[in-house]
Image (spheres, rainbow, N blue to C red):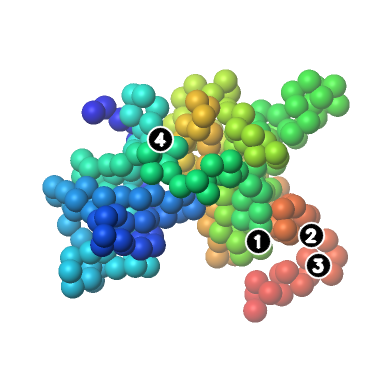
């Protein structure tokens, strides 16, 4: 089965049901999967003894590495330790729970920022042209990323989803994901620093037939400046530029 690599991530073992032999795992973006034990333990998948219970099952709370790939039918598959075993994403899984139906998958929060586009702001392309908006979205994304790190919040910027959690997609803006993320990383590095830009990771997934980008932001070990002098911080769901006493207090907290 030919597949396209999207990203490498981690999955936490949330539980195991001995009655039906199913694991429940949660990947880094919060998505839950029910996985048959015989699939997870298939072929060359070998887990260290420290991750296993006496009966051979994975310990609850342990983390394993997985890869997300997409098949030619645009169905997301998860591969464990790169072995040829996989299971469907919940969107196509017959056992999707009723609680998931109608639930918004992407919602803005302290550690999640939604962007509808790489090319224009939430006001839309026509409004941007009318107002002659000069700030590139890459600068906006750099500010959002630095704000999460400066708030000491590891988070995500999801591009292709609007503020109402509607999946818009960026497939009309991105022809080659590898080249595009390289250019975007370079733009972010110009705004911040190469070290910070290189700490970001990019993932590309297809939802409801649309391409979206998920940028993972770690907590950088020092304050991230934008354009050499601006300090931004995540406050609830907003990106706020710090000035005066707030700026001084934030710097003190980082130095302490």
Q: Are marks 2 and 3 in contact (CB under 8 Å)?
A: yes
| Sequence-wise first label, 2 or 4 | 4
Q: In this rendering, which labeled residue sits more in front, label 2 or label 4?
A: 4
**Callout 1 environment at 10 Å: few (<14), some (14 to 19), or many (20+)?**
many
Identified at 36% across, 56% down, the residue is 24
User: Residue 25 placed where, x, y %?
Assistant: 37, 55
Q: CA distance from mark 4 to mark 3?
A: 47 Å
**Residue 158 appears anywhere in the view:** no
Q: What's the CA distance linking mark 1 and mark 2?
A: 10 Å
Q: Is residue 244 left or right of residue 157?
A: right
Q: Which residue is mark 2?
A: 242
Place residue 118 in its image quadrant.
top right
Residues under numbered marks 1 and 2 in contact, where contact means CB atoms less than 8 Å apart: yes
Q: Secondary structure at mark 2?
A: loop
Q: Considering the numbered disc 1 on the image, is that residue within a helix, a strand or a loop?
A: helix
Structural distance between the alpha carbons of marks 1 and 3: 12 Å
Sequence-first tag of 1 and 3: 1
Q: Which mark is residue 246?
A: 3
Task: Residue at the far left: name it.
Answer: 43
Q: Position of residue 65 (x, y in %)?
A: 32, 54
Q: Is residue 30 left or right of residue 166?
A: left
For residue 63, above or below residue 230: below
Q: What separation in Å lies between label 2 and label 3 (alpha carbons)?
A: 6 Å
User: Which residue is denoted by mark 4 in the rendering?
Assistant: 92
Disc 4 to disc 1, C-alpha distance: 38 Å
Q: Which residue is mark 1?
A: 150
Instruction: Tell me: 218 left or right of 113.
Output: left
* 252, 74: nearer the viewer: 74
Q: Which mark is residue 141?
A: none
Indicate the quadrant where residue 79 lies: top left
């Amino acid at each position: 089965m030919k597949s396209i690599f999207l990203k490498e991530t981690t999955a936490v073992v949330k539980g195991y049901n001995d009655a039906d032999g199913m694991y429940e795992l949660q990947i880094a973006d919060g998505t839950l999967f029910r996985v048959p034990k015989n699939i997870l333990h298939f072929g060359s998948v070998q887990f260290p003894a420290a991750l296993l219970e006496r009966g051979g099952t994975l310990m609850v709370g342990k983390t394993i590495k997985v890869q997300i790939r997409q098949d030619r039918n645009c169905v997301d598959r998860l591969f464990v330790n790169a072995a040829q075993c996989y299971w469907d994403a919940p969107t196509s899984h017959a056992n999707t729970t009723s609680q998931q139906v109608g639930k918004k998958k992407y919602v803005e929060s302290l550690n999640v920022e939604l962007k509808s586009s790489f090319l224009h702001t939430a006001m839309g392309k026509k409004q941007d042209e009318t107002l002659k908006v000069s700030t590139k979205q890459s600068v906006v994304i750099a500010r959002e990323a630095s704000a999460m790190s400066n708030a000491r919040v590891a988070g995500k910027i999801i591009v292709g989803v609007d503020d109402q959690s509607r999946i818009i997609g960026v497939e009309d803006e991105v022809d080659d994901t590898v080249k595009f993320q390289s250019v975007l990383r370079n733009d972010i590095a110009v705004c911040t620093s190469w070290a910070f830009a290189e700490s970001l990771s990019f993932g590309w997934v297809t939802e409801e037939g649309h391409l979206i980008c998920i940028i993972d932001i770690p907590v950088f070990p020092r304050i991230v400046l934008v354009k050499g002098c601006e300090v931004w911080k995540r406050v609830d769901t907003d990106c706020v530029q710090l000035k005066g006493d707030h700026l001084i207090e934030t710097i003190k907290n980082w130095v302490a």
